[in-house]
């Protein structure tokens, strides 16, 4: 799940327009922004295993501190509390927490049963849509297009950056998705981690930048 997470961010931006798009991008991908750091530290583990699913070659061996339901809820609460402390907007903070937590439930649709309920739990969740490439692409594409339509229907560009920068952002998200899904195998786990960190910084930065050049109504 990649552009499916960003679909939630675009929809949330329309629902709560005072929150920067960059913040929504961070919220929807917060779990996957922390995960590569823990990979590099050796705290969580992933293995490149071609054929583990039809869609992705990644075998998520252990990631309870980012991708368990309990810890997703903890990270969601942490970001919501941080936003409330900085902005004092309780409603927006709650929605931010919901967006962060949505990451686990969307992942549960596509992952094989490897998402733990809590650190130390033997119960693993996953409906396994990644075993069906067409179903995975159809679901994420439908989510992304629907969210883009919802967002675009209530927004307009303030200038050329708001118009063409937004289109470039959407194109970059789609290219990144296609490259990750259908490109060559990653050369190493470290490459996966550093790519994830760089991608998070890139999309978060673009989100904050373009947000200043578009107007959104609720």
Image (cartoon, rainbow, N blue to C red):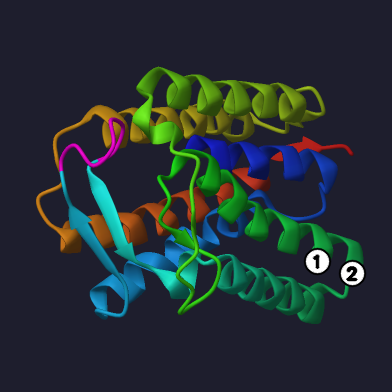
Q: Is residue 206 above or below residue 30?
A: above
Look at the numbered disc 1 and give the secondary structure of its residue.
helix
Answer yes or no: do the residues labelled 1 and 2 have beta carbons within 8 Å? yes
Name the chief secondary structure element in magenta. Answer: loop
**Quadrant in the rendering for residue 35:** bottom left
Residue denoted by label 1 = 93
**x and y, in percent, of residue 57 in the image:** 22, 42
**x and y, in percent, of residue 133 in the image:** 36, 23
145 sits left or right of 87 in the view:
left
- Front residue (pair 127, 79): 127
Residue denoted by label 2 = 90
- Residue at screen point 75% across, 78% down: 81
158 sits left or right of 32 in the view:
right
Q: Is residue 151 above or below residue 200?
A: above
Q: How many neighbours does mark 2 have within 10 angstroms: few (below 14), some (14-19), or many (20 or more)?
A: some
| Span colored in magenta | 50-56
195 sits left or right of 8 in the view:
left
Q: Is residue 196 visible?
A: yes
12 sits left or right of 129 in the view:
right
- Residue at screen point 25% across, 74% down: 40
Membership of 52 in magenta stretch? yes
**Quadrant in the rendering for residue 10:** top right
- Residue at screen point 43% across, 56% down: 200
- Residue at screen point 53% across, 47% down: 108
Membership of 200 in magenta stretch? no
Which residue sits furthest front? 122
- Front residue (pair 188, 139): 139
**x and y, in percent, of residue 126 in the image:** 48, 47
């Amino acid at each position: 799940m990649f552009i499916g997470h960003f679909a939630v961010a675009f929809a949330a931006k329309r629902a709560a327009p005072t929150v920067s798009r960059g913040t929504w991008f961070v919220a929807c991908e917060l779990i996957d922004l922390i995960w590569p750091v823990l990979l590099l530290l050796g705290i969580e583990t992933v293995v490149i295993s071609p054929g583990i699913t039809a869609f992705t070659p990644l075998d998520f061996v252990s990631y309870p501190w980012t991708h368990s339901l309990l810890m997703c809820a903890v990270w969601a609460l942490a970001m919501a509390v941080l936003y409330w402390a900085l902005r004092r907007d309780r409603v927006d903070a709650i929605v931010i927490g919901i967006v962060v937590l949505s990451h686990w439930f969307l992942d549960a649709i596509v992952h094989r049963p490897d998402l733990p309920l809590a650190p130390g739990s033997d119960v693993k969740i996953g409906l396994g849509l990644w075993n069906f490439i067409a179903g995975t692409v159809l679901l994420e594409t439908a989510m992304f297009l629907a969210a883009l339509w919802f967002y675009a229907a209530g927004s307009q560009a303030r200038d050329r950056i708001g118009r063409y920068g937004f289109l470039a952002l959407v194109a970059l998200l789609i290219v990144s998705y296609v490259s990750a899904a259908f490109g060559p195998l990653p050369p190493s786990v470290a490459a996966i981690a550093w790519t994830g960190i760089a991608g998070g910084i890139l999309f978060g930065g673009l989100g904050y930048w373009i947000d200043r050049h578009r107007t959104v109504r609720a």
